[in-house]
Image (cartoon, helix red, strand yellow):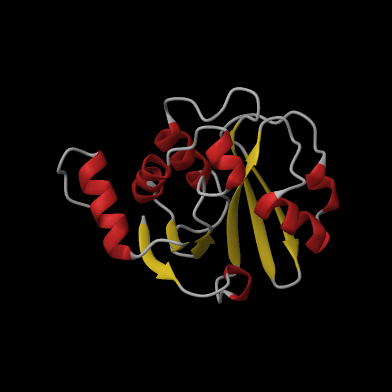
Amino acid sequence: MINKAGKGNIMDTDCKHIAFAVNTEGVNDSGFAGSVARLGWEELKDMGAMKLGSVISKKIGDKTYHALVCHSLKNGWGKNQAEVIKQCFDNIDIDDSEEIASIAIGTGFVGMLTGANPREIVCGMCDSKKNIVLYGFSLEAVKQCYEEERGGRDL
């Protein structure tokens, strides 16, 4: 569930956990994943093949970064983007009450090139049991997105 909209730079969040997208090929040297790799998770740049829906986590400093394996560079995002994102968030091994800061997954250059649907991705975050603080969307935009994508069903 998305309970808050984050403001400012996600790297400055008060949340102890930060989630972001990575690809099944394990080549994550650009975008936000590339930034996390340069922070101290160098192996993230070339991890080899990873299973769709899985999560890899690493603590760097006082934050734990959660790489959500949610798309393919070759095959794109597929038709079940909301379900894959929900599965990834739900697979993060922390208590459901802890907040997880998330970037606006699918809105960057790689997301656009590989066919991400940010509206479906937001719906998957809303359907997750995790407590998500979403950076890059207002709560009003999240609510509108969910209602439109889910056929008028209220968030």
Residue displayed at 80% across by 31% down: 48
Report the side of 134 relative to 153 (left or right): right
Farthest-out residue, top: 75
Q: Position of residue 60 (x, y in %)?
A: 76, 65
Depicted 137 relative to depicted 9: above or below: above
Q: Position of residue 106 (x, y in %)?
A: 51, 45
Nearer to the camera, 82 or 131: 82
Report the side of 3 relative to 28 (left or right): left
Rendering quarter of residue 153: top left
Q: Position of residue 68 (x, y in %)?
A: 60, 44
Nearer to the camera, 123 or 99: 123
Nearer to the camera, 57 or 144: 144
Q: Quadrant of the N terminus?
A: bottom left
Residue displayed at 52% across by 30% down: 77
Depicted 76 relative to depicted 9: above or below: above
Report the side of 51 relative to 58 (left or right): left
Q: Position of residue 31 (x, y in %)?
A: 67, 51
Depicted 119 relative to depicted 100: above or below: above
Q: How many marks?
A: 0
Residue displayed at 55% across by 41% down: 111
Residue displayed at 58% across by 51% down: 93
